[in-house]
Image (tube, helix red, strand yellow):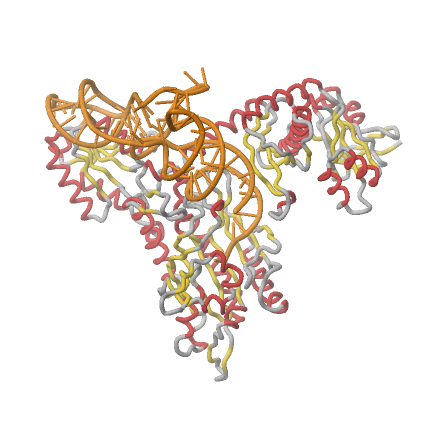
RNA sequence: GCCGGCUUAGCUCAGCUGGUAGAGCAUCUGAUUUGUAAUCAGAGGGUCGGGGGUUCGAGUCCCUCAGCCGGCACCA
């Protein structure tokens, strides 16, 4: 007999060789039907896999949505693989994990898959579900497994097994004739997967994520517990597409791209207004936080990048040119060397530290063509950069201040859920390990002092120092790095940066690189998506459009515009000979937050009828012009000036 | 950069198996002066991303370059 302890603490005795399924049956028939898999001593366990002695057991059902979804998605990946191999013999399978919202499976096949193949594949997948094939777990001998997969021509699978640690049991899961190397667990049978899945897209992906390896074909799918969830997900995707910044940017007249400037933005008046609002805001915040602002050349002698080490690491991605004077120049890909020159000009005293030098720097990077993505990844962008020169003793405190500032600023833009990632030394780096030990420790301590949760990105630091990344998520769930802090003991060394200490001797400061928006271009894109174009009033490029009903009100409309403009509001008139419906629609589509409608009535009364964009139950309010200006003026005040 | 897809009027898109391009919106002109998401009528506008090829003939087939889209890789 074995003793099974359930999560509520109750204990049940079962025969040797009993499985979670027997346990469930012993409790109730409905539980046995609902159970998907079990957690046995914290380990994922198939329902039909016998217990190995006394155990703590939790039965997982659909109610445990996170676990259930993960399992269903993983199982769906398996039937995708089976379906593909049924339909396209000669295709090799590799790996197929569950991911957020679904799963993917990577295949090796000469001929490309196309989305047109999806219908046939999905049909075959549904057949496999209908067949209700039991998933059966087997443990194979390592060498036999390798030989078997090699014999089948599955070289990728064989490679996976070869790379498993020696002691690891090789588990194989069978569904009917088909089987795959897999850690498990799986559902009892394919019928339990259900049909709330859909194949979404094909894409290339490198074997083991390494671009030197073979390129595989990845099929992405989404999978859910029921049709309702699936439909909801597809609906979410559609909605997310509507807030795509590239689409909204066009509708709102913010910017455009064109072939002659791949990865570079042509800012239109509305977009540039938004961009400038962000800069003004950040300038105030930085000034308030004890920063000074500088500006350094866009074009500098290439040698500066050789000194910094960027040329060696990123030379391929730098725009550089040799001029008739035989000097090689580079468009700056980052601002650090420039900032260092300002610091190094003249002598610095310990009394000046920490010295926080900010720069809205335009940088150019020749990003790989495939990396370009709307405003999120461009070749020409503006950083709200700053370099903080401080003593090692001041380092931690400065890091903390930056983290606080970043999070406070994100809140002003409505981002409360920000993920922080700590990245430590990469393989390709400069500087001694002792220096890295020091800088990593300092940054980590500062981070931990905030008490905030954070993720860990091993080996993802900058080549000169460890970094924190602040990650925001776009409309359709893609993550984008925005803010960053990097601790740097290396560049001060390379550029011979010093200050005179209290003792009269030269000392080496530490350099802190930081950006809060990161790229203003990217941040703008994220803002557009975050607000689905309905920007907060203080950021909206056109805050108010004064729209007339008949031409009788033209004169009054102009008066209103002038008064609002005098109050510092961004306002335009729309005097066109069009119906008010037409004007309302056009400016609503253009995401103008307030339409001030004026007709004969308003003109007589000195009033305005304000129509607010997307505010349910508050679509229209009639008030005096003075009241309107007071109310809108308040709305137009940036959040940092309200406190 | 890699894999796949796409590229037709300012915008969104249609154009079957090759036979010299269509719609809606926008623009312009005219009429309409209209109370909160598209007033009516008329007109102009593209040689089908660039280049090359196959063909009697190509937007439609092939090659090539570029850009964009979806991923992957990269991201100072």
The quadrant of the picture occupied by the N terminus of chain A is top right
Tell me the residue at 62%/59% (across/down).
A427
| Residue found at x 57% / y 22% | A119
Total count of labels: 0
Q: Is residue A550 left or right of residue A118?
A: left
Q: Position of residue A13 (x, y in %)?
A: 85, 30
The reply to whether residue A531 is visible in this rendering is no
Quarter assignment of residue A525? top left
Instruction: Please state which of residues A389 and A219 is positioned toward the viewer in this rendering.
Output: A219
Residue A250 shows up from this direction = yes
Placement of A461 over or under A325, stated as above or below = above
- Taking the image as shown, residue A341 lies to the left or right of residue A201, namely left
Q: Nearer the viewer, residue A20 or A382?
A: A382
| A322 sits to left or right of A95 | left
Q: Position of residue A461 (x, y in %)?
A: 56, 58
Residue farthest to the bottom, as pictured: A504
Which of the 4 quarters of the picture holds residue A251?
top left
Residue nearer the viewer, A179 or A435: A179
* Relative height, residue A250 to residue A83 (above, below): below
Question: Residue A472 at what x, y percent from top left?
Answer: 48, 46
| Picture coordinates of residue A129, whole percent (x, y) | 67, 21
Give above or below for A73 relative to A499: above
Relative to A413, A153 lies left or right: right
Residue drawn at (76%, 24%) of the image: A177
Report the front residue among A454 and A507: A507
In this rendering, the answer to whether A513 lies above or below A614 is: below
């Amino acid at each position: 007999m074995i003793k099974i302890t359930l999560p509520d603490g109750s204990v049940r005795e079962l025969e040797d060789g009993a499985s979670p399924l027997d346990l469930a049956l012993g409790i109730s028939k409905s539980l046995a039907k609902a159970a998907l898999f079990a957690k046995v001593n914290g380990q994922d366990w198939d329902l039909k896999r016998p217990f190995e002695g006394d155990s703590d057991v939790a039965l997982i059902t659909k109610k445990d949505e996170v676990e259930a979804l993960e399992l269903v998605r993983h199982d769906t990946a398996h039937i995708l693989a089976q379906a593909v191999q049924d339909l396209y013999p000669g295709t090799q399978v590799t790996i197929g994990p569950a991911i957020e919202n679904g799963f993917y499976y990577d295949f090796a096949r000469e001929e490309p898959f196309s989305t047109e193949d999806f219908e046939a594949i999905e049909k075959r997948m549904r057949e496999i579900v209908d067949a209700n094939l039991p998933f059966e777990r087997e443990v194979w001998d390592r060498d036999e497994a390798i030989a078997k997969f090699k014999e089948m021509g599955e070289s990728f699978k064989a490679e996976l097994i070869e790379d498993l640690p020696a002691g690891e049991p090789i588990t194989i899961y069978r569904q009917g004739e088909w089987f795959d190397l897999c850690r498990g667990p799986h559902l009892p049978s394919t019928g339990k997967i259900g049909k709330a899945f859909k194949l979404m897209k094909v894409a290339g992906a490198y074997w083991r994520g390494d671009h030197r390896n073979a390129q595989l074909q990845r099929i992405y799918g989404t999978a859910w517990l029921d049709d309702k969830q699936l439909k909801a997900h597809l609906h979410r995707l559609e909605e997310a597409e509507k807030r795509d910044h590239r689409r909204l940017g066009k509708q709102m007249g913010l910017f455009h791209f064109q072939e002659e400037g791949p990865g570079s933005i042509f800012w239109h008046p509305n977009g540039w207004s938004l961009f400038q609002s962000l800069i003004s805001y950040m300038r105030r915040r930085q000034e308030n936080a004890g920063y000074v602002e500088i500006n350094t050349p866009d074009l500098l002698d290439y040698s500066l990048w050789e000194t910094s080490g960027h040329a060696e690491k990123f030379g391929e991605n730098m725009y550089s040119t040799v001029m008739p004077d035989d000097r090689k120049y580079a468009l700056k890909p980052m601002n650090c060397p420039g900032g260092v020159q300002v610091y190094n000009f003249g002598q610095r005293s310990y009394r000046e530290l920490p010295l926080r030098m900010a720069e809205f720097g335009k940088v150019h990077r020749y990003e790989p063509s495939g990396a370009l993505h709307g405003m999120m990844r461009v070749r020409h962008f503006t950083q709200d950069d700053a370099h903080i020169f401080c003593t090692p003793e001041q380092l931690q405190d400065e890091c903390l201040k930056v983290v606080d500032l970043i999070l406070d600023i994100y809140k002003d833009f409505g981002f409360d859920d920000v993920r922080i990632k700590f990245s430590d030394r990469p393989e390709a780096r400069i500087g001694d390990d002792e220096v890295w030990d020091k800088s990593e420790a300092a940054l980590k301590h500062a981070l931990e002092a905030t008490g905030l949760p954070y993720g860990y990105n091993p080996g993802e630091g900058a080549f000169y120092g460890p970094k924190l990344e602040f990650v925001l998520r776009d409309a359709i769930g893609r993550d984008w790095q925005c803010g960053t802090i990097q601790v740097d003991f290396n560049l001060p060394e390379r550029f011979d940066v010093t200050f005179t200490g209290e003792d009269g001797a030269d000392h080496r400061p530490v350099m802190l690189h930081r950006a809060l928006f990161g790229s203003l271009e990217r941040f703008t894109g994220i803002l557009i998506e975050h607000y689905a174009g309905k920007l907060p009033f203080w950021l909206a490029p056109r805050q108010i459009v004064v729209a007339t009903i008949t031409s009788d009100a033209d004169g009054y409309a102009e008066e209103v515009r002038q008064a609002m403009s005098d109050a510092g509001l961004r306002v335009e008139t729309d005097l066109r000979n069009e119906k008010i419906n037409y004007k309302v629609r056009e400016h609503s589509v253009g995401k103008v937050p307030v339409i001030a409608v004026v007709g004969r009535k308003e003109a007589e009364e000195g009033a305005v009828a304000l129509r607010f964009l997307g505010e349910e139950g508050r679509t229209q309010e009639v008030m005096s012009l003075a009241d309107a200006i007071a109310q809108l003026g308040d709305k137009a005040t940036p959040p940092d000036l309200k406190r």
